[in-house]
């Protein structure tokens, strides 16, 4: 795979892996999910973030 310099660090950069459903992972390790899996995987990721307590509450003054 030839890496394109302009696509590095973008959500839809050079594809590293692609699944038959349309989900894929880019060369710079971003994941893009297809319409069929987007909502389910979004919920799974949010649940893991909550369980691992990976967020801080930001209060705007």
Image (cartoon, helix red, strand yellow):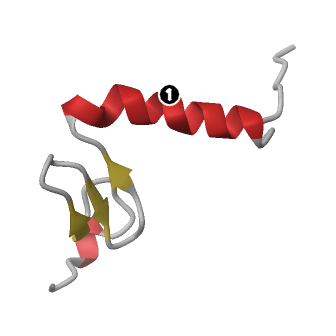
| Image-based side of 27 in relation to 15, left or right | right
Residue behind mark 1: 43
Question: At which x and y percent is residue 24?
Answer: 25, 56
Q: Quadrant of residue 59?
A: top right
Residue ID at (22%, 82%): 3
**Is 18 placed above or below 53 here?**
below
Category of crowding for the residue at label 1, using alpha-carbon neighbours closer than 10 angstroms: few (below 14), some (14–19), many (at least 20)? few
Q: In this view, does 11 lie above or below 2?
A: above
Q: Kindly identify the residue that appears in the image at 39 percent across and 64 percent down.
A: 9
Q: Which of the pair 23/26 is nearer the observer?
A: 23
Q: Which residue lies furthest to the bottom in this view?
A: 2
In terms of depth relative to the viewer, which is nearer, 38 or 4? Answer: 38
Give the residue drawn at x 12%, y 54%. Answer: 20
Q: Which residue lies furthest to the top in this view?
A: 61
* Count of numbered circles on the image: 1
Q: Position of residue 47 (x, y in %)?
A: 62, 31
Residue drawn 15% across the image and 86% down it: 2
- Which one is in front, 32 or 11? 32
Dividing the picture into quadrants, the one containing residue 33 is top left
Percent coordinates x, y for residue 5 in the rendering: 26, 77
Horizontal relation, residue 27 to residue 23: left or right: right
Q: In which quarter of the image is the C terminus?
A: top right
Label 1 secondary element: helix
Dividing the picture into quarters, in which one does residue 1 lie?
A: bottom left
Q: Which of 6 and 17 is in front in this view?
A: 17
- When the figure is inspected, residue 59 is found, relative to residue 19, above or below; the finding is above
Q: Position of residue 50 (x, y in %)?
A: 72, 32
């Amino acid at each position: 795979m030839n890496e394109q310099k302009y696509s590095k660090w973008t959500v839809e950069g050079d594809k590293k892996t692609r699944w038959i459903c349309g989900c894929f992972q880019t060369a710079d390790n971003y994941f893009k999910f297809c319409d069929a899996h987007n909502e389910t995987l979004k919920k799974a990721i949010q649940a893991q973030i909550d369980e691992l307590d990976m967020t801080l509450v930001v209060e705007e003054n």
